[in-house]
């Protein structure tokens, strides 16, 4: 398994180009299942998770052509309703094929995704919503089996604002008979991006980005050519890196409108952030100010930025409280940061982070995608050498992260094993 070695203490300087958003690309590639003919998606990030979803889609019968960041998909030949355990277990977002399969093939047999390091990750709201649209749902031998001759529009209320739950049901309802209303829907930019693509395909979806999304079902959808939005979490990760290393970094192809909460908190933490259209310049102040954070559904502070922000607070000038309200086990990075000298105490879903003068490099273990990114950040700031094991977690969601940091002046390299 590959390792990443970081020599800390160098301020990052220069420009970094932000890649397409993993969490927009995944549902948008899946939406091709609703069409017949060639879809062309550009600015698709080159990530392990994208490879996983392409493998699953081709397994279902889609034809896929990839050239760099452009992926073309033709699902005319969609003929297999089954998403097997071996594919779904690698990436739980595979559950996104459930709604489109029932809408297109009238049936689906999708392996239950199971939990992951950060939590149980149930899909009860996906299933409850699909049943509201008229599908019959059975759980058998670790699989979801769903059938519906024709899905019918319905009112669906989400007990919790679920991102992929909203996306799954938006895709299913797009081809249902009649009007559906999703209430307490997720408002993330990736949900809006998917709705935009579905509307380009001929769907009639209003309200994406608000808590109430209205979908008027249509009889068919047409293939499109469209670009994937930029990744706000990758952008936020590089913003934190700039502040952490007292650097001066300009992010290119970034959408600051998707990062309001993150930018607000980084400014409170002492960052100087200047927005020039799709470019954002971030410089670290002469001190890092302790700042409290509570993760919330969008537009609140993103849970996917919690670990990265905690690294910044671990070397701030005071004590910060960081509350994780979305997932029940998303402090896995804390034990590794402690080994680097961080002073963090956990009580329930809140971490009390007492700033220390500096972190010290150490061998550490990556466990989930964003925790892995936080260990790279810690290594960039630490005194000495940090060796991060199991970086395949990183490769799931960050395209060649060590190359991008090296271009900004970091002493970082990957050892292939
Ligand atoms: C999406 O996961 C993202 N993944 C996650 O990013 C992100 O952390 C998460 O949204 C929250 O923003 C993709 O978009 C592919 P949820 P998702 O359903 O949709 C509960 C990353 O690092 N819930 O919005 O799986 C759930 O337990 C990943 O890129 C139910 O109870 O998250 C959680 O507490 C990690 N029942 C809350 O809702 C359900 O049926 C939010 O989960 C569904 C969810």
Image: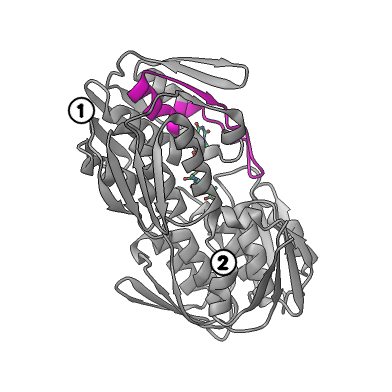
Label 1 to label 2: alpha-carbon separation: 41 Å
Please state, as top left, top right, bottom left or bottom right, where the C terminus lies in the image: bottom right
The N terminus: image quadrant? bottom right
Percent coordinates x, y for residue 354 in the rendering: 70, 68
Q: Is residue 11 above or below residue 338?
A: below
Q: Nearer the viewer, residue 57 or 292?
A: 57
Is residue 58 a member of the stretch shown in magenta? no
Q: Give the secondary structure at mark 1.
A: loop
Residue 316 badge: none
Q: Mark 1 highlights which residue?
A: 218
**322 versus 83 height, above or below:** below
Q: Of 55 and 341, which appears nearest the observer?
A: 55
Q: Relative to 153, is 254 above or below? A: below
At 48% across and 67% down in the image, what residue appears? 265
Q: 306 or 127: which is nearer to us? A: 127
The percent coordinates of residue 358 (x first, y second) are 72, 78
Question: Mark 1 or mark 2, which has the lower sequence index?
Answer: 1
Q: Position of residue 212 (x, y in %)?
A: 29, 37
Q: Is residue 26 above or below residue 249?
A: above
Q: What residue is shown with label 2?
A: 401
Farthest residue toward the bottom? 286
Q: Nearer the viewer, residue 129 or 13?
A: 13
Q: Which residue lies at the image location 35% right of the left edge and 57% below the top edge? A: 229
Question: Does residue 314 appear anywhere in the picture?
Answer: no
Report whether the residue tagged 2 is closer than 8 Å to ligand 1: no
Magenta-drawn stretch contains 100 = yes
From the viewer's perspective, tell me whether residue 196 is left or right of residue 304.
left
Judged from the image, the secondary structure of the residue bearing numbered disc 2 is helix
The residue carrying pointer 1 sits among few (fewer than 14), some (14 to 19) or many (20 or more) residues within 10 Å by Cα, namely some
In percent of width and height, residue 91 lies at 56, 41
Neighbourhood count class around disc 2 (C-alpha, 10 Å): few under 14, some 14–19, many 20 upward: some
**Magenta-tinted stretch:** 97-126
């Amino acid at each position: 398994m590959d390792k990443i070695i970081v020599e800390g203490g160098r301020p990052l300087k220069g420009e970094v180009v932000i890649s397409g958003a993993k969490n927009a690309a995944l549902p948008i590639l899946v939406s091709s299942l609703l069409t017949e003919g060639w879809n062309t998606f550009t600015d698709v990030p080159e990530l392990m998770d994208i490879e996983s979803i392409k493998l699953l889609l081709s397994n279902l019968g889609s034809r896929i052509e990839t050239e760099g960041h452009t992926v073309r998909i033709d699902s005319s030949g969609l003929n297999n309703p089954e998403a097997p355990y071996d594919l779904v277990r690698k990436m739980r977002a595979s559950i996104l094929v459930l709604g489109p399969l029932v809408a297109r093939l009238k049936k689906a047999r999708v392996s239950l995704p199971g939990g992951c390091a950060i939590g149980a990750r149930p899909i009860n709201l996906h299933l409850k919503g699909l049943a509201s649209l008229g599908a019959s749902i059975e759980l058998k031998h670790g699989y979801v089996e769903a059938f519906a001759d024709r899905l019918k529009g319905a009112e669906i209320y989400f007990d919790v604002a679920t991102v992929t739950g909203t996306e799954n049901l938006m895709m299913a309802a797009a081809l249902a008979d009649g009007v559906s209303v999703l209430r307490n829907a997720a408002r993330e930019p990736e949900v809006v991006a998917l709705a935009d693509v579905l509307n380009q395909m001929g769907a009639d979806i209003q309200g994406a980005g608000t808590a109430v999304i209205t979908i008027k079902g249509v009889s068919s959808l047409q293939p499109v050519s469209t670009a994937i939005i930029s990744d706000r979490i990758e952008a936020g990760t590089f913003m934190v890196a700039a502040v952490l290393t007292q650097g001066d970094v300009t992010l290119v192809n970034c959408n600051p409108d998707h990062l309001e909460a993150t930018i607000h908190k980084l400014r409170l933490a002492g960052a100087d952030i200047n927005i020039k259209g799709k470019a954002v310049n971030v410089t670290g102040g002469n001190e890092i100010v302790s700042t409290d954070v509570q993760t919330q559904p969008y537009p609140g502070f993103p849970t996917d930025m919690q670990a990265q922000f905690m690294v910044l607070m671990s070397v701030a000038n005071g004590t910060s409280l960081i509350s994780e309200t979305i997932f029940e086990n998303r402090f896995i990075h804390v034990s590794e940061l402690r080994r680097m000298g961080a002073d963090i105490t956990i009580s329930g879903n809140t971490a009390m982070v007492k700033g220390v003068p500096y972190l010290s490099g150490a061998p550490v273990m990556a466990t989930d995608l964003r925790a892995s990114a936080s260990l790279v950040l810690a290594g960039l700031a630490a005194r000495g050498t940090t060796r991060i094991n199991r970086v395949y977690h990183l490769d799931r969601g960050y395209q060649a992260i060590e190359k991008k940091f090296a271009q900004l002046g970091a002493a970082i390299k990957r050892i292939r094993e």
